[in-house]
């Protein structure tokens, strides 16, 4: 993450990594999850999902680029909601170094 960027990541989400599909056909996730420092912004954005569909995102979450997260994982926002992850995008600086990830829900 670029110098100073970490200082404005004042929110925290809980991230649980997808472990596959359980016997009941529902996704399974790792234990209680990991706390991740981030910036949660309510922002309506139209975007193309990884599946190629045009979808409406209502929340943007910015976090350190070292966080391992995919659209299959589960997040819990500060208000205790668990929105579906629509897209994960890595941001790069001018020297092509990853400095943040943006998650759209």
Image (cartoon, grey):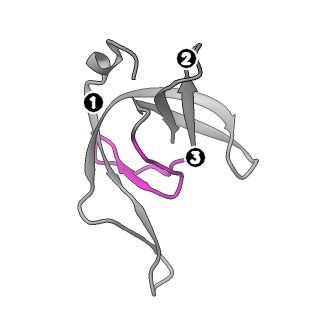
Q: Circle 1 is placed at which residue position?
A: 11
Residue beneath the point at 23% across and 61% down: 32
Disc 3 vs disc 1: Cβ atoms closer than 8 Å?
A: no
Residue 45 percent location from the top left of the image: 61, 29
Instruction: Give the left or right position of residue 43, taking residue 33 as reference.
Output: right
Queried whether the magenta region covers residue 51, the answer comes back as no
Say few, some or many: other residues with alpha carbon within 10 Å of mark 1 (under 14 / 14 to 19 / 20 or more): some
For the residue pair 30 and 85, the one nearer the viewer reads as: 30
- In the drawing, does residue 41 fall left or right of residue 25? left
37 above or below 7?
below
Q: Residue at x 26, y 36 (%)?
A: 12
| On screen, residue 36 above or below 83 | above
On the image, the x and y values in percent for residue 15 come to: 34, 50
Q: Which mark is residue 86?
A: 3
Quadrant housing residue 78: top left
Is residue 84 found inside the magenta-colored segment of the image? yes
Q: Nearer the viewer, residue 49 or 57?
A: 49
Q: Quadrant of the N terminus?
A: top left
What main secondary structure does the magenta stretch of the protein show?
loop
Image location (x, y in percent) of residue 7: 26, 17
Count residues near mark 3 (Cα–Cα under 10 Å), then give few for <14, some for 14-19, many for 20+: some
């Amino acid at each position: 993450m670029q110098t100073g960027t970490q200082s404005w990541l004042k929110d925290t989400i809980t991230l649980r990594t997808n472990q596959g599909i359980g016997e009941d056909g529902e996704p399974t996730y790792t234990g209680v999850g990991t706390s991740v420092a981030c910036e949660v912004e309510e922002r309506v954005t139209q975007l193309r999902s990884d599946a190629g569909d045009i979808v409406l995102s209502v929340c943007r979450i910015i976090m350190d680029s070292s966080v391992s997260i995919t659209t299959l994982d589960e997040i819990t926002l500060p208000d205790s909601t668990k929105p579906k992850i629509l897209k994960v995008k890595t941001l790069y600086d001018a020297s092509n170094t990853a400095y943040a990830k943006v998650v759209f829900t």
